[in-house]
Image: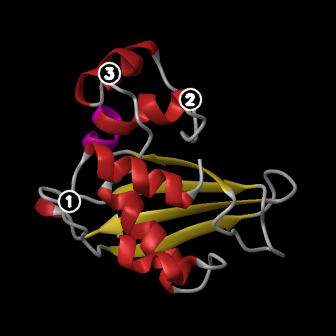
Amino acid sequence: MTIPELLSGTSVVLPKTFYRFVKYDIELLNKDESLGTNSILYSFNVYGSSRGKVFTTHLFFYGGLQGNQPTLKSHLRVSCNCEAYRFFWKNADYENEAHFGKIDAWGKVRGVVRNPDQIPGICKHIMACLYGLCERNEVVGGRSLLSYF
Ligand SMILES: [Zn+2]
């Protein structure tokens, strides 16, 4: 899945009538280009959610890179340790090769409840990280997407 595809899937499952983009504070923990050729793994802490929780996201881009930068055509695998990601997206993303990491059997059962059509998408923490990457010109062409968040 690409960034545009994941944004599109998210808006199908969670229409903007009840889903609002939140520009959380994000902290880049690591940028790892050693996992394979033509790939970059970004890891973030995401702050500012209710109850002061800190979430950790992973965004793994592979293929379609320009130099050492992801593009809108790069494939993307994501993960977040929040409940929303687990319930809405984890299994759907896994089934669509957009989840970064493993998934257990129980995760598969849960994943079908909130997102029965298994449309891949992202939680608001991953969304804030993607927005940050696009806004900071880390993603080639990313600034053209900012109005879609
Ligand atoms: Zn999340």
Give the quarter of the image for residue 24.
Answer: bottom left
The quadrant holding residue 23 is bottom left
Disc 2 designates what residue? 102
Residue drawn 56% across the image and 56% down it = 59
For the magenta stretch, what is the residue range?
A: 83-87
Q: Which of marks 2 and 1 is in front?
A: 1
Identify the element where label 2 is drawn.
loop
Instruction: Check the image and report above or below for 128 versus 37.
Output: below
The three-letter code of the residue at mark 1 reads: Lys
C-alpha separation, residue under disc 2 versus residue under disc 1: 29 Å
Q: Are the residues at dot 2 and dot 1 in contact (C-beta closer than 8 Å)? A: no
SS of the residue under disc 3: helix
Q: Name the residue under label 3.
A: 112
Please tell me which residue is depicted at 43% across the width and 73% down the height of the picture.
131
Which of the two discs, 2 and 3, labels the residue nearer the N terminus? 2
Is the residue indicated by label 1 positioned so its CB lies within 8 Å of ligand 1?
A: no
Name the N-terminal-most of marks 2 and 1.
1
Q: Tell me if mark 3 has few (under 14), some (14-19) or many (20+) residues whose alpha carbon lies within 10 angstroms of its own.
A: some
Q: Earlier in the sequence, mark 1 or mark 3?
A: 1
Who is closer to the viewer here, 148 or 135?
148
Amino acid type of disc 3? Answer: Val
Q: How far apart are marks 1 and 3 (CA)?
A: 21 Å
Given this view, does label 2 or label 3 mark the residue nearer the observer? 3
Q: Nearer the viewer, mark 1 or mark 3?
A: 1
Instruction: Measuring from the top left, give residue 66's x and y in whole percent.
Output: 80, 73
**Which residue corresponds to mark 1?**
16
Find residue 107 and report its image quarter. top left
